[in-house]
Image: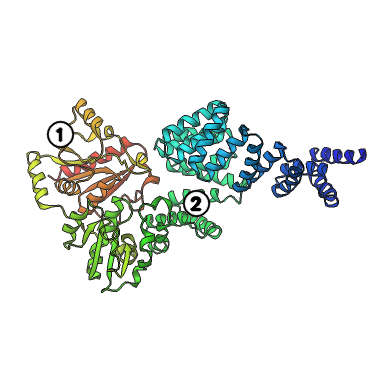
Amino acid sequence: MSDYYSYLNEIAKNFNAGKKNSSLIKLKKLLNNDPYNLEINNLYHQICIKLNLIEDAIKSLKILSKTDLDNITYLKKLYILYIKNNNYEEALIYINKILFINNQNYDALRDKCYILYLQNNINESKKYAKISLDIKNDDYFIYNIIGLINFTEKKYISAIRYFKKAINLKNNYVDGFNNLGNCYYELEDFKNCFDNYKKAYFIDRNDVNSIINITNILSLKNRYRLSIKLLKEALVKYPKNTKLLYNLSLCYFRSKDEINSTKLYNKFIKIQPNNDDFNYAYCAYNLSIGNFTKAWKEFDSRFKIKKNYKSFKNINKIKKKLVDVKLLKRSNKILILREQGIGEEILFSSVYSDIINEFDNINIEADKRLVDIFNNSFNKKVFFREGYFSKSNNLNKFDYIIYAGSFLKLFRKNKESFSKKSYLKSDKKKYLYFKDKLSSLENNIKIGISWKSVLNLYGNLKSLQFSDFQSIFKEQRSIINLQYGNIDSELKEANNKNLKLINFEEIDFFNDFDSIAALLKNLDLFITISNSTAHIAGALGIPTIVICPSKSTTYFYWNPDKENSIWYNNIKVLPVKDSVNKTFNRINEIISSIQNKY
């Protein structure tokens, strides 16, 4: 018997000395001859854990735990292995066995809290988080879990507080810094987001999540070369990691690298052909470079991506009525539904004239703020507020239901098919109202400004500060506000700096699109960042400058490289290449050239 134990000890020593394969083979032979031997299984499961042979380790641990039913050490090892294998149901079985033995076992309570969070059972997870904290309040991991719960509930400020507590307890906690960065990302605080991603990356440069996070934010900040370099280096270490490949592809999409974009797309899509987020990213990239044939092939992937869930929340109700636009006939009774945000709804409405001319029996749902302006502009009373038909139970009157964007595939097949004419009209009475209001400024050039977007994940990246516009406030220029949202601080800033910013308080710049359109029609120039008002101005034909603070944050309808937009002939797109000040120097030159024509 002593020789037997000596032999097991020799195997263990050889394994620790680096002879891993030969040690494993010898141990397997022993186990085959005596599969239920406790000493062999005890050594075997430890070696398997070190070699990441999870299934083999579990098999031996089950034998050991059946022999010693109250051994919490075996039960804990089992549930940890099941968690590693993403088998949470089995993990809970062994956690509950531990809690049956000792209902105050902290590790089991904490890890049950974590599994319940992973299963999206948030209320139960909260309950176990509280029990865990009552037992022990100095464990970084429980604070991390509570932070994740708050993050899931979109309570980002609370989540930040808990992630910071986790980091205070473990100052090199990579997941804590990444999670903290994720909170700031959602809050559009990209400075703090970048700082925390950077800390996580420098703690562990081999951590895949850290690499993905830092490279994503670098590409959003236009630092493509560094982002691509880091991702390529990571793929050498982890060649099968699809997340790294996905993010490298996105970098090439954002940088408009056509050769590498196509190459990476073809490589990734062979691995995950049904990845709708990736297909839509490739579609948007092709739209941005004017490759419409490739773009429209993947355009329907927009129905399935998570960020568009609200836009297509009624798709299950009407999917039986959905059909490819190419199959529609002139006599079909068609209901057309809005999609995306206001900006893209206005963009897509550029095909409404084509639709009205092509089909005899149509009804179109629109955002309630656009119904009047659409009915007036397209000279046909076929527009109704969103939900007027689609939320009713009377959809049988329609042969087919189509989302508005789908018609782009029918009427915008190439660059030549884009109309160079404006297609929205302002209300005549409101136009005359604002003309009268601005009549005292007749000798001045009338310039509207808008500097921020507040309803978009990338709003902060697109937005400017009111102070950035200060240099355009000069003689014989009347500067008129068209910014929606709370601008009290900007109005105060303008007053303190003796900058005359004309503001029509009677206009609700968030809801009253008819008044916005009428005011825009009275302007000589509109200067804005990418927001919904930019689209209204573009569709009205108002001379407009759209400033793009970052190339990567612009959408497929702006072309910063060529400084134009194929969708709006009257818009000049100015990217911020070096600095905002230099961009406004160019804007001042454009304004002066307009003034010289007066």
Identify the secondary structure beneath mark 1. loop
Position of residue 141 measured from the top left corner of the image (x, y, whole percent): 57, 33
Which label number is shown at residue 475?
A: 1
* Position of 323 relative to 561 (above/below): below
Could you say which is closer to the camera, residue 528 or residue 132?
Answer: 132
Could you say which is closer to the camera, residue 175 or residue 569?
Answer: 175
* Position of 309 relative to 460 (above/below): below
The reply to whether callout 2 and callout 1 are in contact (CB within 8 Å) is no
Relative placement, left or right, of 561 versus 176 is left
Identify the secondary structure beneath mark 2. helix
Q: Amino acid at mark 2?
A: Ser
Residue found 31% across the figure and 37% down from its top? 464
Relative placement, left or right, of 373 versus 341 is left
Q: Quadrant of the C terminus?
A: top left
Residue found 41% across the figure and 54% down from its top? 285
The reply to whether residue 500 is in sight is yes
Q: Amino acid at mark 1?
A: Glu
Task: Give the residue at the far front of this rendering.
Answer: 100
Q: Earlier in the sequence, mark 2 or mark 1?
A: 2
Q: CA distance from mark 2 to mark 1?
A: 49 Å
Residue that label 2 marks: 249
Looking at the rendering, which quadrant does residue 142 occupy?
top right
Could you say which is closer to the camera, residue 496 or residue 309?
Answer: 309
